[in-house]
């Protein structure tokens, strides 16, 4: 049976779009079945990653530690990590992880549970919005695209709030599109925009309001409809936004005022972390960034393999002046909003420091555009331009699959399984200059090291070849929906192989094995010292529950909080550490240097001054 599409109607002040097409029993049945399939796809792809690998050093375990200390301190206002004020980030992600810890204990899977649930909510939201715009089939395809794309999977392997920001943006733009259909816009829609913007601010700071305001403003300017702003109940919506967003900021400012020469929360959070960071003038200086061309290209790459259908989807976006100033129907208006949503994000970060995952909140917009076009293709006659375009894109994707398979097989045959007992770290070649990339450590892989990944590499390569080949084959026989199913199943296998490889590589990125070793011998009064920055070994903090001392010039995320008068001692100099090492207390020294600051040893070792 065919899924039915929602009727579209011109968007104007006098025309409210009927939604009765979604109230029939058939549509309801397909919605339930689609939700079941979306949930199953989510469960197969995302639930296994809750339980392995270990939490990673840096952002992953550092953010989990913030939530753990939030529970221990019973302080849900001021964030702490390693006993030090951590005022860089907004609180919503930490609240959700801390709530999970309260319910289930401080474990790896409970740290990841909120992220997995955010993804599920994002998939449901994508299905909801896609169904409103493109019909039930378009909503289903949009959710499938998002569930099986490479980028969202990769960047939910560690604890960052960008998926949460994407969820609030999706809901906010959904409410905005409702206001274009209502005359006048309802309180629910207008206040929905305000609440989701506030939640985005509580998830990742001021970009939570900058992104929706910029995209909505650009839409209204391009369509010559700025007067619509006055219909969005600006006074009451602003009050709703402030009621939701302001209380935490006010409490954080009151709890963390200026203390002598140390500026408090307001300056550090708003000026230093929001404004100066964007202007590359943050203290301490922060220049980690992805090259601009790569940053733009990654937005497309993160939607692999579905990105081959993006050019056709973009052709459905109204961009000509005459189109923009005409009465746009529901689909045209939504396509324009989705494009602006993604563009605002990549343009905004084009003028600042940026990481690969900064585009993550824009990926749902791209998934919606692609999902809408896939539905249009599948509902088109066999000889239609959409069918032909789909076949051409599928041929291109099959060619890419053949290249990936060829490269994978060449690497497979040029590598050998490492000898039993070989440490993967011994087979890597370090490239510290690439560690500005969040995935930069994977560039350390050598042909010898690839031998440890033979099974997932073979599975990845075969799946890509067979999946893209089957998609091309069935699309040539006018079975576009079957082709989409082939790609979705292919990505289930591909992402499973990615997870397997990630688990194999994770000891390079995590100090958990060392934390476990320390716990076996730890006695009250012992010290754990990190020869480097805190983030390099932050898993020690989470897994042992013991504050770390840092043998490093004050820097990174602990630097500013350590300046407050009530902050515990964290940083050690070479001289103070030498006294500790020769003193009566046992010291565990973590190091990843070939020649640690005080002692010689192998990279990423724990050394101790006493048995």
Image: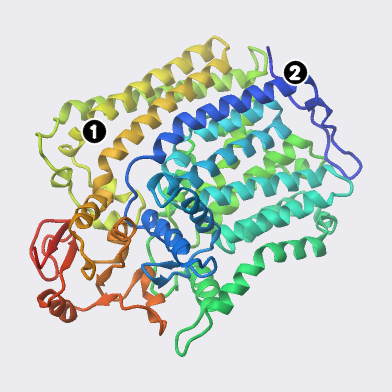
Question: Can you identify the residue that label 2 sits on?
Answer: 26
Residue 244 coordinates in the image, percent (x, y) = 68, 62
Name the residue: 47% across, 12% down: 473
Whether residue 68 appears in this view of the structure is yes
Tell me the mark number nearer the camera, choosing from 2 and 1: 2
Q: Quadrant of the C terminus?
A: bottom left
Q: Earlier along the polypeptide chain: callout 2 or callout 1? A: 2
| Image quadrant in which you'd find residue 442 | top left
Give the number of the disc on residue 33: none
Left or right for 583, reference 565? left
Residue 175 coordinates in the image, percent (x, y) = 74, 47
Secondary structure of the residue carrying numbered label 1: helix
Above/below status of 325 relative to 306: below
> Number of callouts in the render?
2
Q: Quadrant of the N terminus?
A: top right
Residue 409 coordinates in the image, percent (x, y) = 24, 24
Secondary structure of the residue carrying numbered label 2: helix
Residue 462 coordinates in the image, percent (x, y) = 33, 21
| Image quadrant in which you'd find residue 599 | bottom left
Name the residue: 22% across, 43% down: 445
Distance between the alpha carbons at the discs numbered 2 and 1: 47 Å
Question: Can you identify the residue that label 1 sits on?
Answer: 453
2 and 1 marks in contact (CB < 8 Å): no
Above/below status of 16 relative to 101: above
């Amino acid at each position: 049976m065919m899924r039915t599409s929602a009727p579209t109607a011109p968007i104007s002040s006098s025309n409210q779009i009927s939604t009765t097409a979604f109230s029939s029993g058939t549509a309801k049945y397909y919605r339930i079945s689609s939700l079941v399939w979306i949930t199953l796809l989510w469960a197969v792809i995302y639930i296994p990653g809750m339980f392995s690998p270990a939490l990673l050093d840096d952002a992953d375990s550092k953010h989990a530690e913030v939530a753990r200390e939030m529970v221990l301190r019973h302080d849900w206002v001021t964030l702490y990590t390693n006993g030090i004020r951590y005022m860089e980030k907004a609180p919503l992600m930490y609240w959700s992880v801390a709530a999970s810890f309260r319910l289930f204990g401080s474990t790896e899977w409970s740290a990841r549970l909120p992220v997995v649930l955010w993804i599920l909510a994002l998939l449901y939201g994508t299905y909801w919005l896609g169904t409103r715009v493109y019909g039930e089939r378009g909503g289903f395809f949009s959710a499938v695209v998002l569930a099986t794309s490479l980028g969202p999977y990769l960047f939910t392997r560690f604890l960052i709030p960008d998926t949460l920001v994407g969820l609030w943006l999706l809901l906010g733009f959904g409410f905005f599109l409702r206001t274009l259909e209502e005359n006048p816009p309802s309180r629910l829609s207008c206040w929905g925009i305000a609440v989701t913007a506030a939640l985005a601010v509580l998830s990742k700071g001021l970009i939570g309001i900058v992104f929706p305001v910029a995209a909505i403003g650009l839409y209204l300017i391009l369509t010559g409809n700025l007067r619509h702003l006055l219909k969005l109940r600006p006074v009451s919506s602003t009050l709703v936004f402030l009621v939701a967003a302001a209380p935490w900021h006010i409490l954080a400012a009151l709890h963390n005022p200026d203390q002598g020469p140390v500026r408090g929360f307001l300056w550090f959070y708003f000026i230093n972390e929001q404004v100066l960071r964007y202007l590359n003038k943050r203290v301490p200086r922060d220049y980690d960034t992805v090259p601009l061309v790569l940053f733009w290209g990654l937005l497309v790459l993160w939607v692999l393999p579905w990105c081959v259908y993006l050019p056709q989807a973009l052709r459905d976006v109204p961009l000509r002046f005459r189109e923009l100033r005409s009465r746009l129907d529901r689909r045209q208006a939504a396509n324009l909003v989705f494009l602006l949503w993604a563009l605002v994000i990549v343009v905004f970060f084009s003028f600042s420091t940026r990481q690969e995952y900064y585009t993550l909140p824009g990926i749902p917009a791209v998934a919606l555009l692609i999902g809408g076009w896939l539905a249009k293709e599948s509902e088109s006659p066999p000889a239609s331009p959409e069918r032909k375009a789909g076949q051409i894109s599928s041929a291109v994707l099959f060619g890419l699959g053949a290249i990936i398979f060829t490269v994978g097989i060449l690497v497979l045959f040029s590598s050998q399984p490492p000898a039993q007992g070989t440490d993967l770290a011994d087979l890597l070649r370090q490239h510290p200059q690439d560690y500005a990339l969040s995935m930069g450590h994977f560039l350390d892989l050598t042909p010898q090291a690839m031998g440890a990944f033979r099974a997932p590499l073979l599975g990845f390569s075969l799946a890509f070849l067979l999946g893209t080949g089957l998609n091309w084959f069935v699309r040539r026989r006018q079975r576009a929906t079957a082709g989409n199913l082939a790609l979705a199943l292919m990505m289930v296998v591909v992402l499973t192989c990615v997870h397997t490889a990630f688990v194999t590589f994770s000891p390079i990125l995590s100090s958990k094995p060392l934390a476990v070793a320390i716990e076996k011998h730890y006695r009250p009064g012992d010290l754990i010292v990190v020869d480097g920055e805190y983030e390099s070994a932050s898993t020690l903090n989470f897994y042992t529950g013991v504050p770390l001392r840092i043998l490093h010039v004050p820097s990174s995320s602990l630097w500013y909080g350590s300046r407050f008068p009530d902050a515990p001692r964290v940083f050690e100099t070479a001289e103070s550490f030498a006294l500790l090492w020769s003193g009566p207390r046992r010291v565990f020294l973590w190091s990843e240097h070939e020649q640690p600051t005080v002692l010689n040893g192998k990279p990423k070792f724990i050394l101790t001054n006493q048995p």
